[in-house]
Image (spheres, rainbow, N blue to C red):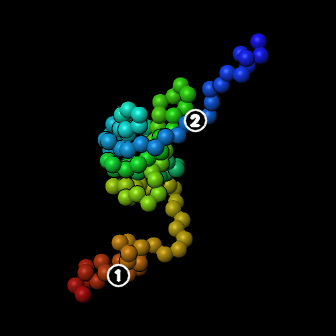
Amino acid sequence: MWLSGQQKRPNPAGEGQTGTVTISGKGLAVQLDSERRNLELYGPGGYRWTPKVGQRVLVLKNQGEDPCVIGVRQGEDAPERVTVEAGAVDLKGQVLIDGVPLEAYIATIVAGMMGG
């Protein structure tokens, strides 16, 4: 019958929601429509991070799969820790540590070791 073909079909693509982190680290939990616990955390290859409690995150839910956290809202507080692992890291531009250029930061450390 014609009407049977007019029913809304489920969307095979993932559905994204934003939620608030309630537990950080191991056992990551996010408050969506209800609290979801032990969520997997995804990011770019070689880049690992953990969102803080209270941060807004993007959660992806695919049909038939468990939800996973795939990002944090830009402009939010920085994560507690970020780890980058790679065979090589190619940095272009100026590298700053707490606002100090890397070269000046190293020079300060060396001067302190040399007693000056």
SS of the residue under disc 1: helix
Q: Which class describes the residues within 10 Å of circle 1: few (<14), some (14-19), or many (20+)?
A: few
Residue 46 visible: yes
> Is 70 or 10 nearer to us in this picture?
10
Residue 38 visible: no
Give the residue drawn at x 47%, y 30%: 66
List the single residue furthest toward the bottom: 116
Q: Amino acid at mark 1?
A: Ala
Q: Going by the image, does 32 lie left or right of 111?
A: right
Image height check: is 43 above or below 93? above
Distance between the alpha carbons at the discs numbered 2 and 1: 50 Å
Pointers 2 and 1 in contact (CB under 8 A)? no
Q: Amino acid at mark 2?
A: Gly
> Is 113 or 24 nearer to us in this picture?
24
Q: Going by the image, does 9 lie left or right of 54?
A: right
> Is 62 or 109 nearer to us in this picture?
62
Label drawn at residue 6: none
Residue 49 lies, in percent from the top left, at 41, 51
Label drawn at residue 107: 1
Residue 16 lies, in percent from the top left, at 53, 40
Residue 10 lies, in percent from the top left, at 62, 26
Q: Which class describes the residues within 10 Å of circle 2: few (<14), some (14-19), or many (20+)?
A: few
Q: Which of the 4 quarters of the picture holds residue 112? A: bottom left
Give the residue drawn at x 31%, y 81%: 108
Give the residue drawn at x 53%, y 25%: 64
Label drawn at residue 14: 2
Image height check: is 90 above or below 103? above
